[in-house]
Amino acid sequence: MNEFSDLEIMKRVQSGDTQLMGILYERHKTSLFNYFLRCTNNRVRSEDMVQNVFLKVLRNIHNFNGTGEFRYWLFRIARNSWIDKTKSKEPVMKAVAFENDHDQVQNFETTGETGIKELRKLKLRKALECLSEEKRDAIILSRYQGLDYKTIAEISDCTESAVKSRVMRGLTEIRKMVNV
Amino acid sequence: MEIEKYEEELLNILESNIQNKELYVSTLADLNPKAKGVIMQAYDTWNELNTLDSESPSSSMDNSFYESLSKFDNSRSEKSDMHIVPTPKKASKIFTLQRLGIAMTFMIGLALGGYLDFFGTNDSENRTHYAVNNSGLVKFASIEQTPLASDRIKGIIGTKSHSDLDAKILYALNDVICNDPSINVRLSAIETLVLFWDNPDARKILIKAIPFQNSPIVQLELADIMISLEAKTSSENWNQLLSSNQLEPDIRSQLENTLKEIL
């Protein structure tokens, strides 16, 4: 079954073999988890969101018309889930993330060269997190998920030009933040 | 938000799969000396983002997902099963009796209505009528044309409204019972054929399908049906299934226990 494409498996899932969703889950869980991890900076929350996305896929299985790649559809659902979450929980999540970062920065200051590199990574993570939702999303989807600008535009309901602008402005802002 | 020409070119380079991106980016920077700093800094940031490693989710995420998937599957089965709840065994007996009750009522109704040949009447006219009307119904069970299991079940349930099953429908139901990947669809087809137990072809299909069943739920359901209908002619097919080394030991002993009257 593993040699079947995502689309072929989706057809089987649509016809009632819901257990085959496990194959799609195995194929995409890590990439989806890292997408949420970069959005939330929180492992537990990211894992919860991955599961919720796959359950949403199952509940809306008949809305998938098979014309595009399953991965793109999956990321559209993931992005919408994340946006819904930020609308309701953003203040709490940001506060938690900041507290964690503060503790980590305190630890890195005394651990030499490795600590400086780790601190740089932490600053990058923090800078990514501090971007506006649209810019962060555009950078994560293009840099880490390897999606092209056209696909990101479709997923994000905006123009390709807007995606490019968000990536460019996002990179500039990250640079400014990490060099402070 | 407007985007400069050089910015667009830089982003196209970053998105592409070309090998020596640095050369392209530095050329672009040389061609746009005023924006050189912005281009090189954006390129460095893009590369630096690569230092943020990917992480692996924990195994507890997998466990929770598979648990949720299983729950989802069960709740879906309960919805589509309607009154065909195959397990546990006691429930299965009850529902088999219920089904037989419905079947008998249906058959008596049909007999009183003169649709069945219980009293020696000629129903060839009726048969022709249904054959014509049913010509398109074979599609109900084809997985290629009806990919949704729930639609196939609806199609199968729809055939129950007919007084008899023509060859095309019987062929389609036979195909479903032997090949359909969904247990619920198979159970619906079995339930329909039980309603037409009086039809020798329906009986034959049900009995011949026995060795092809690999789902314990379907196997136990068929065993209950055969016992209820005292179908001793099915013994050879049961023995064929029982001799299969793919049968789970627990299910084998349960089947042998259930079927001892007809084996």
Image (spheres, coloured by chain):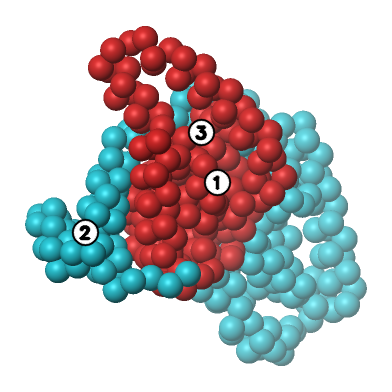
Mark 2–mark 3 CB contact (< 8 Å):
no
Residue at screen point 61% across, 52% down: A83
Q: How many marks?
A: 3
The image quarter in which residue A97 lies: top right
Q: Position of residue B85 (x, y in %)?
A: 73, 43
- Both marks 2 and 3 on one chain: no
Chain identity of mark 3: A
Residue B197 placed where, x, y %?
69, 59
Name the residue rendered at 60%, 43% in the picture. A52
Instruction: Give coordinates of residue B133: x percent, y percent.
Output: 66, 87
- Which amino acid, by three-letter code, is at mark 2? Lys
- Viewer-proximal residue among A93 and B124: A93
Residue in the foreground of this view, choosing between A16 and A74: A74
Tell which subunit mark 1 falls on.
A
- Residue A41's tag is 3
**Which structural element holds mark 3?**
loop
Label of residue B225 in the image:
none
Query: Which residue type carries mark 1?
Result: Phe
The residue under label 2 is: B36
Whether labels 1 and 3 share one chain: yes
At numbered mark 2, what does the secondary structure look like: helix, strand or loop? Answer: helix
Can you identify the residue that label 1 sits on?
A54
As helix, strand or loop, the secondary structure at mark 1 comes to helix
Q: Which chain is cyan?
A: B
Residue at mark 1 to residue at mark 2: CA–CA distance? 44 Å
Image point 81% across, 39% down: which residue?
B94
Neighbor class of circle 1 (other Cα within 10 Å; few <14, some 14-19, many 20+) is: many
Colour in which chain A is drawn? red
Say few, some or many: other residues with alpha carbon within 10 Å of mark 3 (under 14 / 14 to 19 / 20 or more): many
3D distance between C-alphas at marks 1 and 3: 20 Å
Camera-near label (1 vs 2) is 2
